[in-house]
Image: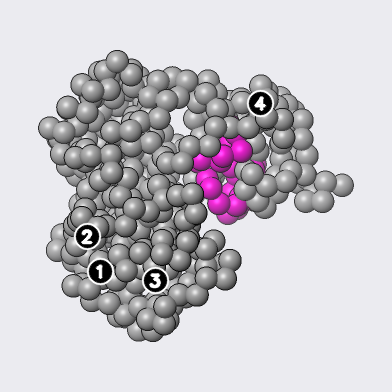
Amino acid sequence: MDASNKPLIHGACPGALQPMAAADGLIVRIRPPYARLSQPQAIALGELAQEYGIGQISLTSRANLQMRGIRASEHAALIKSLMKLDLVDVSIDSERRRNLVFTPFWIDGDVSHQVGARLIQALDKPGAPTLPAKFGFAVDCGATPVLTGTSADIRIQHSADGELMCLADGMGSGARVSIATAADTAMRLAHWFLDHEGAPQGRGRMASFLASGATLPAEFHEVLAAPGLACRPEPGKHAQGWLVAPEFGLLKSEDLYTLAPLGNLRLTPWRMILIEGVGDGAAAGVGLRAGDPRLNVFACTGAPGCAQAHSSTLGIARSLAAQLAHGERLHVAGCIKGCAHPSSAAITLVATAPDEYKLIRNGKACDQPVRVGLRAEQITSTPEYLLDFPENGA
């Protein structure tokens, strides 16, 4: 790859206190406690996105939200407003450490809620491990784990026999814990990861470290993990409320104004929003219906919004969605970082130059392509050829 075609690789995702610069302004990531926004908070975020930016908001696979196009000169004023809403950490270090994702289906006072509160406290104590920026925790203590497909390095969930457990990502077994001991056990596992050089130069993930041959302490083989949810939930009615799925996880301020009056909002790692206690949110008119093929399409902002994107993404993603086979996933990336979908997809298109893309089958944005030099018009005018293109490139 030509050096000029390589994206700038950031060590961390953006935060609120430490935003990331993009072509359309700063990206400011908000990490609400327990991924929950009260109605006043949600409305205020919509207003702030318009006042200090361009009114565009994106949902992330970490159950966070990002404001786009924030003017750098007004970042400090935005932070003051976020502090008043209790939506910003006290320091950059605290913000980085609080890299947690919660099951969206927790209930006040349940196991996930109690374990999560203790884990937040543990991560903010003196002596808490200084982990790689992308290293994260999943609190997933419902009867059936729902976050198995969500990126996390240390997981707290139920075992196959119903006990609470803590396990390393990529493992089928873990340590037996209780509500009182889960956070301390997770901290012990995190320290083990660092002490055994799982993060040289400050980078590293648990699953890849274990795959390289690292051996976990014996306690992390005590109980077997319960099988997780086979696929992500569909938008629509659920026990705790109504799941709304914005196209590609993208929102405008006006969408928050529409959704917030219906109930408190929970962000999910599936780039959906759960409206608490709502039996029918379809009337709001925000988001895709169950079965919409765009639910299986992942696309980043692309050009011109992202400075690292070589070309646009959203138009191609919309054009190809209806051509996908049932359950097949499409990822359209502006560069090889593949921010919108770090995992494999049946079909991945990666922009390599203005109006030029490469095709990857059953892989990630950084994998080897089966074809290069594809033009947008060629892709959208003959999608059946693209989607049926053989994996060997013949």
Q: Amino acid at mark 2?
A: Ala
Q: Residues within 10 Å of mark 4 (few under 14, many from 20)?
A: few
Looking at the image, residue 78 lies above or below residue 131? above
Q: Residue 378, located in which quarter of the rendered image?
A: top right
Q: Residues within 10 Å of mark 2 (few under 14, many from 20)?
A: some
Report the residue marked by disc 3. 167
What's the CA distance linking mark 3 and mark 4? Answer: 41 Å
N-terminal of the pair, mark 3 or mark 4, is: 4
- Disc 4 is placed on an element classified as helix
Q: Nearer the viewer, mark 2 or mark 3?
A: 2
Q: Main secondary structure of the magenta part?
A: loop
Looking at the image, residue 219 lies above or below residue 108? below
N-terminal of the pair, mark 2 or mark 4, is: 4
Report the residue marked by disc 1. 184
Q: Which one is in front, 91 or 259? A: 91
Q: Nearer the viewer, mark 3 or mark 1?
A: 1
Q: Where residue 377 sits: x, y (%)?
A: 71, 24
N-terminal of the pair, mark 1 or mark 4, is: 4
- Disc 2 is placed on an element classified as helix
